[in-house]
Image (cartoon, helix red, strand yellow):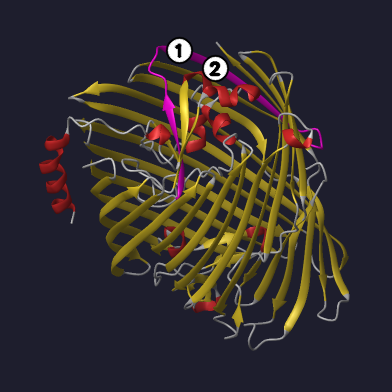
Amino acid sequence: MWLAGAALCLLCGPVVAQTAAPDRDVQTGVLVFDPAFFADSRPDTALDMIARLPGFNFDGGNSETRGLAGTAGNVLIDGARPSTKSDGLGDILGRISAAGVARIELIRGGSPGIDMQGQAVVANVILLRTVTTERVIEAEADILADGHVSLGLTARYARREGDNQIEGSISGYWDRSWGDSEGFRRRFTPAGDLIQDASLASTARNRGVRATAAGQRRIAGGLFRASGLLDWSADTGSQDQVIRSGSGTSSFNMDEEDQFEGEFGLDWNREFGARSGLELTGLQRFASSNSFAGSNNSSGNSNFTSEATTGESIGRAILRFRPSDRWALETGGEVAYNFLDSATAYSEDGIPVPLPSSSVKVEELRGEVFGRATWRPDPTLTLEGGLRVEVSEITQSGDSDLTKSFVFPKVRLQTTWTPRAGHQLRLRLEREVGQLDFGDFTASADINLGQVEGGNPDLEPQKSSVLEAAYEYRFWGEGALLASWSYAAIEDVVDIIPLAGGFDGVGNIGDGIQETFELRLTLPTDRLGISNGRLQLSGNWTSSEVTDPVTGQERAFQNDLDFGCDASFEQDLGDGRWTWGVEHDCNTYRGRVFRVREIRTAYLEPEVSAYLQWKPVGDLTVRVDVENLTDRVRGNDRDLYAGPRNTAPLSLRETIRVTSGPSVEVQVRRAF
């Protein structure tokens, strides 16, 4: 398929190379936002500008997905995706000065010649070609309710001159907190009688250093870009459990993890006239981690250790051809090699306890070929069709020796109809195939809950047939209303299953269905008497059904919520010198996890946060964020059974509730 598509593009390209490209700025479905649109908010970076796009919900992509296909977010830079996975899309946009952005195009439903990255809507950041040089220093301090202060410092340099670019950054943070909290753990009989009350006090700290560098030049008639990243971090955490009443012993739990990650990427783009182009990408990643988790009490101790190294090598080629203003063709292929080499050990009172798949090496060789066509028969209608065929072989060695091969065709069809200005309908039908998480092949532990999970070598990827419909309405210049509905028929649902030795692990539990409805509203408030304000509301409803592998009864998917919502408001004052905002997630999270001997329900109360930003001069920004103003309570409700839930009685109920208190973050940014 790739060879046939490549031959077509190469043979036809020279014939139409002299035809001028269309002006996409005036095409229906492409909205253009120039710097004047963002002037009231005086943004510092391209990421600030993306956050101001009406009705656009930023997606940074998924760097955990192996390969490059399906990992991209919904923002392009000069029409291309960044050739990196470890360096987040938000971080990249945060390093681009707003002064260097010529315009941002919001492309809805596809446009000939634009790689939509599998997204229905993408934003394309177009950079200026003039000479720009920028040096930025950013400092931040996080102040917790108990007075603890963590610090961070970032330095960046960037120079752009036409297509030539060079940039670099280095950042470090010290004693950053991710979860200091205090609360209680209470255990009850099935009848509701209190049998144990324990206090909980937890701390979490991390520190790290990250350095990035990238350069871009014209080489061999194309645009060549090289990028690199190095990252080191160390995390520590602890939890003190003190029994205040009832039976049981107090305990002290701790965990530590050191991680190192490196990445190097190459990207070369060559245009063959105005209608065809070639893109080549190479990427190499490597990471290693060492972790320890231990629990100590008067009756004994338990320890869990893990060492792991991972790597990924990717080669990718894409050939694009646009025979006319209405048609665009794309074909390409990708090959990737991935590995995970992991060794884990668990002991109780110094005596080793065998774990399923405690020492495993997983290797995967995968390839994919794909083709895509976009057709715009008239300015109001866009049709897109694509086919991907993925072939992979996963080999496991160590505690289990197993080889599995997979072949998955993935079809995507999308129709976008714009009957009149401000109204757009989108319909998508797609076959999606998930990836196996290498971490599920090996054992893991949650030491605070006293829970060890075995590895499972016998896993199948989750497959879905998805139908999605969306309606978008734009009004009042910056107003946008989006309503979407999706239905997914899912095969080989990935969930929790019983394993040998009495352990739980990740496995497949059969087929299921999932239905989602979402509403998102962006409302400019000028016509309501509040100048330069913007109100955003969102709500989503989810219904799912799958057969529980333990009880055989129908239930929802793990962690699915019936309803979720969010509301925020922000306003620019004093010609953008002052900006303030507030955000509120307006529902209590109640996601559920179904294990073999336990049902765990997460508890997370709504949170209110606010910020104030001041720009006394154009190159200086001071921002203060106050998080968790409501001092929300979080935790779990656990129903623990004496054995498998289908045969054993309920032995006890456990309630965990903790709070962290409000925190204040102060950021100062200065550009030179």
Q: Residue at x 70, y 46 (%)?
A: 179
Q: Nearer the viewer, residue 374 or 80?
A: 374
Screen quadrant of the C terminus: top right
| Residue 123 inside the magenta-drawn segment | yes
Where residue 595 sits, quadrant-wise, is bottom right
Where residue 409 sits, quadrant-wise, is bottom left
Q: Position of residue 51 (x, y in %)?
A: 59, 35
Q: Main secondary structure of the magenta part?
A: strand
Q: Amino acid at mark 2?
A: Val
Where residue 386 sits, quadrant-wise, is bottom left
| Residue 610 inside the magenta-drawn segment | no
Q: What is the spatial separation of the Cα atoms under label 1 and label 2, in whole angstroms?
A: 10 Å
* Side of 539 where 193 appears, left or right: right
Q: Which residue is mark 2?
A: 136
Q: In what element is the residue under mark 1? A: strand
Q: Position of residue 215 (x, y in %)?
A: 34, 23
Q: Which mark is residue 226?
A: none
Q: Is the residue under label 2 in contact with that under label 1 (CB below 8 Å)?
A: no
Which segment is the magenta one? Answer: 120-148
Say above or below: 592 vs 47: below
> Does the image show residue 38?
yes
Q: Which residue is mark 1?
A: 133
Q: Nearer the viewer, residue 291 or 316?
A: 316
Say above or below: 591 vs 419: below
Screen quadrant of the N terminus: bottom left
Q: Position of residue 652 (x, y in %)?
A: 77, 76
Q: Residue at x 47, y 17 (%)?
A: 157
Q: Residue at x 40, y 56 (%)?
A: 415
Say above or below: 409 vs 228: below
* Side of 184 where 517 appears, left or right: left
Q: In what element is the residue under mark 2? A: strand
